[in-house]
Structures are given as C-alpha cells and as structure tokens.
Image (cartoon, helix red, strand yellow):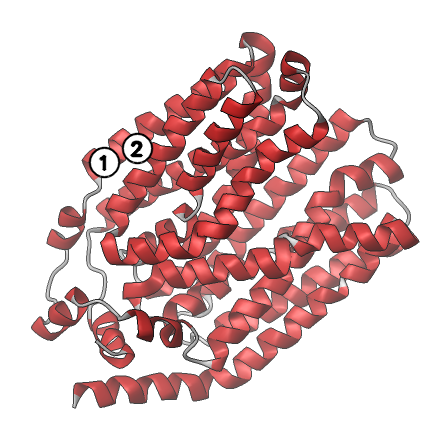
Amino acid sequence: MNIANAMVADYQEAPSVSRTYAWVVFALTFGLLLSDYMSRQVLNAVFPLLKAAWGLSDTQLGSLSGVVALMVGLLTFPLSLLADRWGRVKSITVMAAVWGLATLGCALANNYGEMLVARFFVGLGEAAYGSVGIALILSIFPANMRSTLTGAFMAGGAFGSVLGMGIGGVIAVHMGWRWSFGIMALFGLVLVSIYRLVVTEQRLTLQKSEVTTEAKEAAAARISWRAMLPSLFSTRTVKCVYVGSGLQFFLMGAILAWMPSYLNRYYAMPTDKAGVTAAMFLLIAGVGMVFCGGITDRFSRNNPSRKLTFAIAFCLISFTFLSLALQIPAGPLQLVLLGLGIFLVAGTSGPAGAMVAGLTPTSIHATAFATLTLANNLLGLAPGPFVTGLIADKVGLLAALRVILFIGLLATAVFVIAKRKYSHDLAYLDAMRAKARI
C-alpha cells in the first residue's frame, strides 16, 4: 500500500470510541508511563545505599543508570516500528510486563552484575513505550485534542521521575533499598494486569462506528518498509517540527540537568535542598507541558497552523524569561523568572506532537513519535547537558547557561520555517489523498 492510500484511510477513519472508555484508556496508559519513569529513576534515590552495600564505584553506579538510556536510544525506533505492525495494545502489555519483572529482578539482585542485567531489561521494556503509548491515545481521541494529550502524556515523564526518586528514597530509608525496587515493580505489574483486562485491540475496534469499507480495507493493510521513511519525512513542515522540537529540548535538558549545580554554586544550597528545589522546577516543567498543550488546542480548533504559532510563542517567551533571570543577581526574583521560563520551555511538546500526528499516517504513528523522540534526545536531551558542561569548564556555569539560551532562538527560527511551509505541505497531502481516491 502506498503512502497516499494510507493517508486516505487515516483521515476517513475518525476515532469514535466512547468518551468514557477513551479516558479510561488514557488513565491506564498514563499510569503505565508513571510506572515506566518510577522504575527508571528509583535507582538514583538508592545510589548511596548501593554504593555502601556493594562497594560500587561511581562509574559502576553511572552504568546502572546509563544502560537504560542506552537501550532506549538504540531500540525506540525499531520497537515502535514493530508495534505499528504487530499491534500497539499487545506491545504495550508486553513492554510493561518486561520492565515490571525486570524491576523486581533489581530488588532480588545480589551483586553489580545481576543488577546490570536487570537494568538492561528495564531499558528493553521501556524503550518504545512513550512513542507507542501516545500513538494509541491519539488514535482514540478527536484530532483537536492532540496538543493537550501529547503535552499531558509527555509531562508524565517528569511526574514519574519525581515520584520515583521521592517515593523510592522514603521507602529505602524506612524499609531498605530492595523494597524501593519491589514496590515500584508491584505497582507496575498490578497496573499492567488491569490494563490487560480493560484494554484490548478488539474492544477498541468494536467501539468504532461508521467506518467506510474503503477505510477498513486500507487500515488493514500495512505500509511497506520501503514506503516507511518517505511517509515519516513526507513534508518540509514535519522535518522542521522534528528539528525544532529537538532544539528546544536541548534548552530544557541543559537547564534542568544543571539546576541542582546552579543552586548549589550560586545560592549555596546544600546538595539535598538543591535536589529538592530542582525537582520542583521539574514539576513546574511538567505542569507547563500540560497547560501549553491545552491552550494550544483551545485556540487552534479551526486553524491547525496556529499550533506552530503557539510553538513559536512558547520558544520566544521562555527565552525572554530565562534571559532576564540569568541577567539579574541570585535571589527570589531570579527564581520566579526561572520558574516562569521553565514553565514554558517544554511547551512546544504538545504542538510538535500534534503536528507530527497530523502530517503522518495514523498507521505509523508509533514510528513517527519514535522519530520525534529520537530528535528530542539526539538533538536535545543528550547533547544539552554535555555541551553546557563543556562551555562551563571554560567560562563558568552562569555564562554557559546564558550562551545555550540562544539555542531557543534557533528553535524559534525552525518553527517559523515550518509555519511558512505548512499551507503548501497541507495542499500537497490533500492532493496525494485525492489522487489515491481516483
């Protein structure tokens, strides 16, 4: 089946599951995302206890965390592609079961080698969950809610990280580090059991109505491997969205990664207080993602191109607040301005996700979101902290943060190009769909 036929099916088959069931699916899928990040980040909360128990070096501790990120980076795309072809619900169930059992394995590990193997399987299970989960959610909600849903779902990573570190630390202090992993595993395994009973491909299909025969036949087909890449990068707009989103995440990743160090060096906060304060900023970023996605949908119902306008606005306003914050002395006003900037810095996640969903076939949305995730990581979250550190070694952390803020202006420029090309690209896609109907 060619790309045009795939898009015909996608735009003819509007999601029509009941609103109640759709929100139940969202709640369970979001809950699994929390479990994903709680299982991933609980390790950071027990670093000191593992170091004392097994005499681990900092390099070994870092490898236990890094192996998960490595697996996510290597396997997000291929596993998302597999999920698009095998079935998203089945894939989600298997992935959640794998990371749940692997987290239980962490609780039972007796040495560094066993823990490393368990963490390897945590990464294997979590690798494609974000992209497959959001693709499933977008398939059962109206298109005019895509920014809200994408922003809210992606914010789950921030919420889950804070919960994993916070709850894991409390449990470790009172019950021991093994229970930190064990309770996270229990939460995930119970949730995936409920998910398996409530959410099935059959129930999602049975709740759809008034789907044309042509759409059913087209949706049942699979895009060939050869057609996959062109459909992921079919327009200049979607290419720019991938890049713009990644560049803005460079800014987010750098600021949040270095926030504990910044608070320690310029506010003389002890390590624990700096960590808690940085976690609050992470929560602010998560809430901002939800808010920005919602407001984007609210004002873009009748004009999808406004999503790009809002992405541009979020880039510019966050740049302004953060620039002002880093130009004034340390103090309450600076913290307020930093909070306002961080609230908006990841606001582009909702509009970007909505544009990717609107410009790629529904049948490959998991793969499309995997591509967006790769862009966010390869252009943003991975190099952001590293580049900032390199600059900081030469000119100091404050000056480095001032320099990397200009990546936000570069992201703005890319989103501006996307907006200028959007009308032309939309006409191109409409022409493709019209041609496929002939």
The circle on residue 239 is none
Residue at 63% x, 15% y is 54
Residue at 70% x, 44% y is 257
Q: Residue furthest top?
A: 175
> For mark 1, what is the residue?
196
Q: Is residue 341 visible?
A: no
Labelled pair 2, 1 in contact (Cβ < 8 Å): yes
Quarter of the image where the C terminus is located = bottom left
x then y, percent, for residue 213: 8, 72
> For mark 2, what is the residue?
192
x then y, percent, for residue 149: 41, 54
Q: Is residue 294 left or right of residue 251?
A: left
For the residue marked with disc 2, what is the amino acid?
A: Val
Residue at 61% x, 75% y is 414
The crowding category of the residue bearing disc 2, from other C-alpha atoms within 10 Å (few below 14, some 14 to 19, many at least 20), is many
Where 118 falls versus 123 (above or below)?
Answer: above
x then y, percent, for residue 346: 59, 55
**Front in this rendered view, residue 7 or 269:** 7
Q: Is residue 390 visible?
A: yes
Where 348 falls versus 190 (above or below)?
Answer: below
For the residue marked with disc 1, what is the amino acid?
A: Arg
Q: Is residue 396 left or right of residue 181?
A: right
**Front in this rendered view, residue 56 or 238:** 56
Q: What is the spatial separation of the Cα atoms under label 2 and label 1, in whole angstroms? A: 6 Å
